[in-house]
Amino acid sequence: MFSIGQLAITSMISHLIFIYLTWRVVQTINVDPLIRKGHVTEARVLLIFITITIGTGVSRFFLDILQWSQDLLYLF
Protein backbone atom coordinates (compact mmCIF):
# COMPACT_ATOMS: atom_id res chain seq x y z
CA MET A 1 0.00 0.00 0.00
CA PHE A 2 1.04 3.53 -0.65
CA SER A 3 1.38 6.07 2.13
CA ILE A 4 -0.21 9.47 1.63
CA GLY A 5 3.14 11.01 0.61
CA GLN A 6 3.92 8.22 -1.84
CA LEU A 7 0.47 8.51 -3.37
CA ALA A 8 0.90 12.28 -3.74
CA ILE A 9 4.26 12.05 -5.51
CA THR A 10 3.03 9.17 -7.69
CA SER A 11 -0.03 11.21 -8.69
CA MET A 12 2.00 14.32 -9.50
CA ILE A 13 4.52 12.40 -11.59
CA SER A 14 1.77 10.47 -13.36
CA HIS A 15 -0.13 13.66 -14.22
CA LEU A 16 2.99 15.35 -15.56
CA ILE A 17 4.00 12.34 -17.66
CA PHE A 18 0.56 11.92 -19.21
CA ILE A 19 0.19 15.65 -19.84
CA TYR A 20 3.58 15.61 -21.58
CA LEU A 21 2.62 12.58 -23.68
CA THR A 22 -0.69 14.18 -24.60
CA TRP A 23 1.09 17.40 -25.57
CA ARG A 24 3.38 15.43 -27.91
CA VAL A 25 0.35 13.80 -29.54
CA VAL A 26 -1.57 17.09 -29.84
CA GLN A 27 1.44 18.67 -31.58
CA THR A 28 1.11 16.13 -34.40
CA ILE A 29 -2.42 17.33 -35.20
CA ASN A 30 -2.61 20.02 -37.88
CA VAL A 31 -4.91 22.66 -36.41
CA ASP A 32 -3.70 25.52 -38.63
CA PRO A 33 -6.78 25.42 -40.90
CA LEU A 34 -9.00 25.84 -37.84
CA ILE A 35 -7.24 28.95 -36.50
CA ARG A 36 -8.48 32.35 -37.58
CA LYS A 37 -5.87 34.95 -38.40
CA GLY A 38 -4.88 37.00 -35.39
CA HIS A 39 -6.05 34.35 -32.91
CA VAL A 40 -2.93 32.20 -32.68
CA THR A 41 -2.38 32.91 -28.98
CA GLU A 42 -5.93 31.93 -28.09
CA ALA A 43 -5.60 28.73 -30.11
CA ARG A 44 -2.38 27.80 -28.30
CA VAL A 45 -3.99 28.42 -24.91
CA LEU A 46 -6.94 26.26 -25.97
CA LEU A 47 -4.56 23.46 -27.00
CA ILE A 48 -2.83 23.70 -23.63
CA PHE A 49 -6.17 23.43 -21.81
CA ILE A 50 -7.22 20.48 -23.97
CA THR A 51 -3.87 18.81 -23.31
CA ILE A 52 -4.18 19.27 -19.55
CA THR A 53 -7.76 17.95 -19.56
CA ILE A 54 -6.97 14.82 -21.59
CA GLY A 55 -3.66 14.12 -19.84
CA THR A 56 -5.18 14.48 -16.38
CA GLY A 57 -8.11 12.25 -17.32
CA VAL A 58 -5.84 9.50 -18.59
CA SER A 59 -3.60 9.83 -15.55
CA ARG A 60 -6.61 9.64 -13.23
CA PHE A 61 -7.72 6.46 -15.02
CA PHE A 62 -4.23 4.97 -14.61
CA LEU A 63 -4.12 5.87 -10.91
CA ASP A 64 -7.62 4.49 -10.33
CA ILE A 65 -6.68 1.16 -11.93
CA LEU A 66 -3.56 1.06 -9.75
CA GLN A 67 -5.59 1.75 -6.59
CA TRP A 68 -8.32 -0.74 -7.50
CA SER A 69 -5.76 -3.46 -8.17
CA GLN A 70 -4.34 -2.90 -4.68
CA ASP A 71 -7.84 -2.95 -3.17
CA LEU A 72 -8.49 -6.42 -4.62
CA LEU A 73 -6.60 -7.81 -1.63
CA TYR A 74 -9.64 -6.97 0.53
CA LEU A 75 -12.02 -8.95 -1.68
CA PHE A 76 -11.65 -12.16 0.32
Image: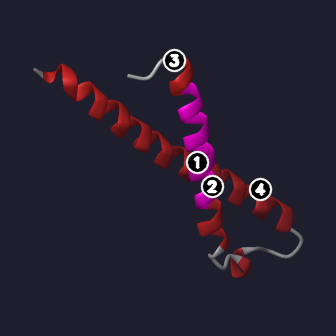
Q: What is the C-alpha distance between the residues marked 3 and 4?
A: 33 Å
Residue at 69% across / 60% down in the picture? 47
Q: What is the C-alpha distance between the residues marked 1 and 2?
A: 5 Å
Element class at badge 3: helix
Which residue carries the number 3 mark? 4
Q: What is the C-alpha distance between the residues marked 4 and 1?
A: 12 Å
- Which portion, as a residue range, is magenta? 8-22
Q: Please identify, in this view, whether the residue under mark 2 or under mark 3 is nearer the observer.
A: 3
Q: Please identify, in this view, whether the residue under mark 3 or under mark 4 is nearer the observer.
A: 3
Give residue 69's quadrant in the image: top left
Judge whether residue 36 is colored magenta: no
Q: How many marks?
A: 4
User: Disc 1 marks which amino acid?
Assistant: Thr
Which residue carries the number 4 mark? 45
Residue at 60% across / 50% down in the picture? 17
Which residue carries the number 2 mark? 50
Residue 67 horizontal/vertical position (percent): 36, 31
40 over 65 or under it: above or below: below
Q: What is the C-alpha distance between the residues marked 4 and 2?
A: 9 Å
Which residue carries the number 1 mark? 53
Say which quadrant the N terminus sits in: top left
Asked whether, in this view, residue 23 is left or right of residue 6, the answer is right
32 over 1 or under it: above or below: below
